[in-house]
Image: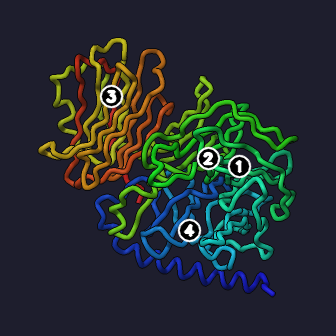
Amino acid sequence: MLTSEHLETRHLEAIRKAQESIDLLAVGVSNDPHRLAYHFISPSCWINDPNGMIYFREEYHLFYQIHPFSAQNGLKHWGHAKSRDLVHWEHLPIALAPTEEFERNGCFSGSAVDNNGTMTIIYTGNVNGPDKVQVQCVASSEDGIYFRKYVGNPVIDKFPEEGSKDFRDPKVWMHEGVWYMAVGSGKDGRANALLYKSADLTAWTYVGVMANGLDGQGRIWNCPDFFRLEGVDVLLASPAVSPTERDIRTNIYMIGQMDYETGRFTQVSDGDIDLGPDFYAPQTLIDDLGRVILFGWMDMWWNPMPTQAYGWTGAMTIPRVVTLDGNGKLAFTPAPELQQLRSNELQFGAFRLSPEQTDLLDEVKGDCLEIVAIIHINESGANRFGFRLWRSADSSQETIVTCCLTNGELIVDRTRSGIVDGGIRVIQLMPAANGKLKLQIFLDRSSMELFANDGQTTASFRIYPDPQSLGISVFAEGGCIQFESLAIWKLNAIW
């Protein structure tokens, strides 16, 4: 009979081996010119989904999927880090390692909760193959660092009739003294979230289908997330996709109301969290200020990952604060804590930019920058304006971000961005308020995150320029652009 002591001994040994491998592979990562400077990254190895985000004992905790034995996708463990300010992170020991038969192919994604002072993780144990099985499991920690698996795992050992073998990534929250769990799944080609409830996090009762996906919302939901915001309930999901399904939405939010009497979430509206090609599996936490903070995985399964040659791949986005924008949509804005990284400010007040002015930013160089531009659309005669980023001295290499004022498109051209041709991405912006357009850009060595109109539209990209490509420029086409302001900062490294 398995005892808690035997289970803990096995788990600690698996964690030790994983940690040794991470430390060994970390030796070469600093040689990579594309190693991110101010985003959360692991010491080495492959990482993907953020997991178990929680504010616990005055610190932010971030767990994440990691394969600790290489920079390739593989056997998933739970990595762990904590922060006091959402910006500077302390790496902690591996939190979960697969040791049991029902998780032999990985400890998949899940969530973390504060259970009367005990941090408790609820995660998916995964078994691959023709007899694929995914079960839900529990582990707990008194100090928020070292976790003991529940000897009675799995706490949910089979999917209900309304689900399928794709049965994973539990999101757990409390409502009126009862724990609820949403598990991502799907049935007959339509995604759903399945609802359970519990008094103690170990004995769970199936309630029913919490939400069914609508047309265009995927066939399986990965990484569901759920929270209440300003009087409405919000469900997040990442539809399962493959390289042949790239036109399918990969991350969505649904606004509605949760009826705990029936166990049903009624969807009223939906939207996309991030429209870039390198964003997936967003998760949230609620901090001591009541803010909803979101991170996403900043990469994608099928995209080129040249950093693997240096022993690492994958990163988290910058932290984003989730709010309602006043039009029944969600907005995702950079957490203000990031402003502490700013230095070397270059500030322009109101000015008019003509197509002939191409040298305004000739003295600005850098690959870790924040750019904030506000323009007056109605006072501008141009049909386009934008920025050329990571520009080489001979202009043969650059990433071009263009705002089309005539049709509201945001165009990102990565065809000449560096060692990876990322193609051209066209994003439709929401109508600008008060005749203004605000564009905020974060650059970090091999990533770019765009925020238009205070997070009404966001997009994340991985870009791999030559280390010498540090130039930037601003341009106008078809006439002059009236700027209200333009500010550029260098962002300091956290690692």
Q: Which amino acid does label 3 sit on?
A: Leu
Q: Which amino acid does label 4 sit on?
A: Leu
For marks 3 and 2, the one nearer the N-term is 2
Residue shown at 21% from the left, 34% from the top: 361
Residue 260 place in picture, x, y as percent: 84, 42
Q: Is mark 4 on a helix, strand or loop?
A: strand
Residue 381 place in picture, x, y as percent: 28, 14
Q: Is mark 3 on a helix, strand or loop?
A: strand
* Front disc: 3 or 2: 2
Q: Name the residue under label 3.
A: 486
Residue furthest out toward the top: 379
Residue shown at 86% from the left, 49% from the top: 177
Q: Mark 1 points at which residue?
A: 193
Q: Is mark 1 on a helix, strand or loop?
A: strand
Q: Nearer the viewer, residue 149 or 235?
A: 235
For marks 4 and 3, the one nearer the N-term is 4
Residue 437 place in picture, x, y as percent: 41, 23
- Pointers 2 and 1 in contact (CB under 8 A)? yes
For marks 3 and 1, the one nearer the N-term is 1
For marks 1 and 4, the one nearer the N-term is 4
Give the class, few, some or many, for how many residues have Cα within 10 Å of label 2's Cα (few <14, many ≥20): many
- The circle on residue 237 is 2
Q: Mark 4 points at which residue?
A: 92
Q: Is residue 228 left or right of residue 45?
A: right
Q: Can residue 146 be seen in this view?
A: no
Cα–Cα gap, marks 2 and 1 = 9 Å
